[in-house]
């Protein structure tokens, strides 16, 4: 592998809420909650949330197999300006 290549980080490309919503919708299609929590972590990093005082807590809450509480998920979504919506 070329040492000059940087590892791809999706957080570098999540620069607006419409793109973030599309990213989450794609992740949710499979129903894999570990991927969803990782995506939330990507979004938090893209929005600069992980750079503040609760970085360690956020990283622990949103990594694979962590099973965060639903209120934690809602708080992260709210802090990045994303709302959940049920559609029938």
Image: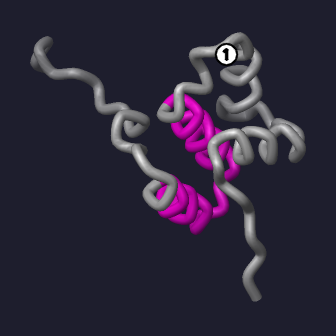
Q: Which residue is mark 1?
A: 55
In front here: 50 or 6? 50
- Estimate how packed mark 1 is, as few (under 14), some (14 to 19) or many (20 or more) residues with alpha carbons within 10 Å: some
Location of residue 49 (image quadrant): top right
Answer whether residue 72 is magenta in the image. Answer: no
Magenta residue span: 20-45
Q: Residue at x 73, y 16 (%)?
A: 54
Q: Position of residue 50 (x, y in %)?
A: 60, 21
Name the quadrant of the N terminus: top left
Tally of numbered discs: 1
Counting from the top left corner in percent of width and height, residue 11 is at: 43, 35
User: Is 41 rendered above or below residue 14?
Assistant: above
Residue drawn where x is 48% and y is 61% of the image: 18
Q: Is residue 24 magenta?
A: yes
SS type, badge 1: helix
Is 50 on the left or on the right of 76, as rendered? left
Question: In the picture shown, does residue 79 fall above or below 16?
Answer: above
Q: Residue at x 87, y 46 (%)?
A: 70
Q: Please state the horizontal and vertical placement of residue 59, each as a whole percent of the image.
A: 67, 22
Main SS of the magenta part reads: helix
């Amino acid at each position: 592998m070329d040492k000059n290549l940087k590892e791809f980080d999706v957080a570098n490309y999540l620069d607006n809420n419409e793109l973030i919503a599309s990213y989450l919708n794609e992740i949710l299609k499979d129903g894999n909650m570990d991927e969803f929590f990782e995506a939330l972590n990507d979004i938090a990093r893209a929005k600069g949330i992980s750079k503040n005082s609760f970085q360690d807590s956020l990283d622990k809450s949103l990594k694979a197999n962590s099973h965060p509480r639903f209120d934690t998920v809602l708080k992260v979504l709210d802090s990045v300006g994303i709302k959940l919506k049920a559609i029938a």
